[in-house]
Image (spheres, grey):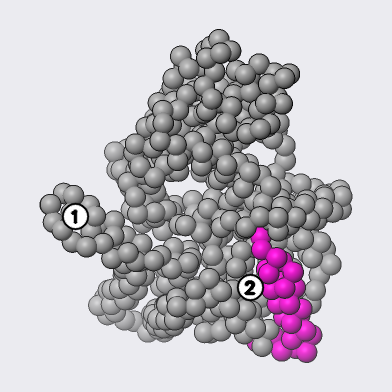
Amino acid sequence: MLFSSWQFIILFLPIVACIYFLLNRQQWVSAGKAWLVIASLFFYSYWDVRYLPLILASIVVNYAIGTGLSLSHQALGESPKPAWHQSHRETVLLIGIAANLLLLGYFKYTDFFILNTNVVFGTGFSLQGIVLPLAISFFTFTQIVYLVDSYRGTTSQYNLLNYSLFVTYFPHLIAGPIVQHNQIMPQFNDKANIAPNAHNILFGLGLFGLGLFKKAVLADTLAIGADRGFEATHALNFYEAWTASLSYTLQLYFDFSGYCDMAIGASLLFNIRLPDNFNSPYKATSIQDFWRRWHMTLSAFLRDYIYIPLGGSKGSLLRTFTNLFITFLLGGFWHGATWMFVIWGALHGGATIIHRLWTSTGVSLPRPLAWATTFLFVNFAWVFFRAESLDSASRVLQGMGDIHSALPVPMNQVPTADLAWAGTLADRLGLVLPPQLIGQLPFLLLVIAALLLLPARNSMELLSTKSTMRYYWMGVILGIVGLHFSLAKTSTVFLYFNF
């Protein structure tokens, strides 16, 4: 079920919220939590009920392992334990993490490894054609966090109902934000949150509306230019290539940040505040700054559960750089089972190392130049993230560097493909504009739109100001516009559903 679908907006969300607060009003708080779990499982299985047993089994097994780790942690403080007891706990934790990763690996990476084995060793193993279960990457990470925290002894207060709610809570289940139990479960147990809150409802509706507008109006429109460029089989000229890359750069942001706005907004209707996931990442002035702003919950996970356990920056400079590179490489591979994601992760790992080296010199770039350098690199790296093959990425990058094709050409030599984006509109535009300008118009409009949006406040900043009421209603109005666009066409899935 899509956040942008009428089934979710008009039926699912209001029904679930009303029944939840009716149960709470009768002081049936546990029943309210159970209702949210049931509704969330329905939300999950709406896509494909065949994978409902998978998430249920994952919840039960991880809860059992986590409970065992938590109880053993309590036992450590009651009496002296032999050294093997701690070693046993570490073994159980590693087995639990490995089981989650093996499950994720089977569904997500089996065909990738079979294909590459066939290429390297000349074998003829058949691809399995395994369908990736929805949200497996996100609920796997969520449960790994729970196991680690259980090992540390910070989850003893959770029963199976609370744990199930933590994992399945529908606003974050499909594509994040990646949450930790201590970020949301105390909110469910806060008596102040069991009744409807008018401020949270209006705030949530405004934020949900802004997210819906980002997705249905902006992201889905930008997808047209991105798909046309990345799926082309002909050589792209300068304007076509830059239009494709910039379209995808903006599409990905509006699509995923729109989803997160909708997730946070929907959750606020239940008085539960999910962690922010975006903070104007394209305003970043360094690659490190970018990762503090982009998909912030994933960045925190990679830092806390991969980079720091590897040793972080405590060792030599070479060890620190190795830890950084491995972290980004794994972060790229987590997004999908193709070499394009590995290349993307490697690029960001390399850029982060270069940034560290540059920072150590004490030399700083002027802020505009630092921003331009960062944005151009991020846009360059997104080409590999979007491309389905190295050939596709090369075609776009070659076009972006083809300065010769950016030079003016005689009017009678303007390629027909340059005008095709406008269809019959090109004929009308041709009455008032030179053909060269018509061909360049998508690129120019993208640049102008990006420059206009850059200084603007993001959705969280808009709705967190003191004079918020007009922004709340602005979000609701934009949401109505977004719903109109969403209903006028077949709803498209959010990009991060594929990861």
| Residue with the mark numbered 1 | 117
User: Is residue 188 highlighted in magenta?
Assistant: no
Q: Where's residue 73, x and y in %? A: 41, 78
Q: Main secondary structure of the magenta part?
A: helix
Q: Is residue 190 left or right of residue 126?
A: right
Q: Disc 2 designates what residue?
A: 186
Of residue 465 and residue 19, the one placed in the foreground of this image is 19
Report the front residue among 240 and 449: 240
From the viewer's perspective, is the residue at label 2 or at label 1 nearer?
1
Q: Which mark is residue 232?
A: none
In the rendered image, which quarter contains the C terminus?
A: bottom left
**Amino acid residing under circle 1:** Thr
Q: Is residue 287 left or right of residue 26?
A: left
Question: Is disc 2 placed on a helix, strand or loop?
Answer: helix
Range covered by the magenta-colored residues: 4-30
Q: Amino acid at mark 2?
A: Pro
Q: Is residue 61 above or below residue 488?
A: below
Regarding mark 1 in the picture, which secondary structure is present there? helix
* Residue 286 % position (x, y): 52, 33
At 77% from the left edge and 60% from the top edge, which residue is drawn? Answer: 205
Task: Report whether 210 appears left or right of 382.
Answer: right
100 lies above or below 25: above
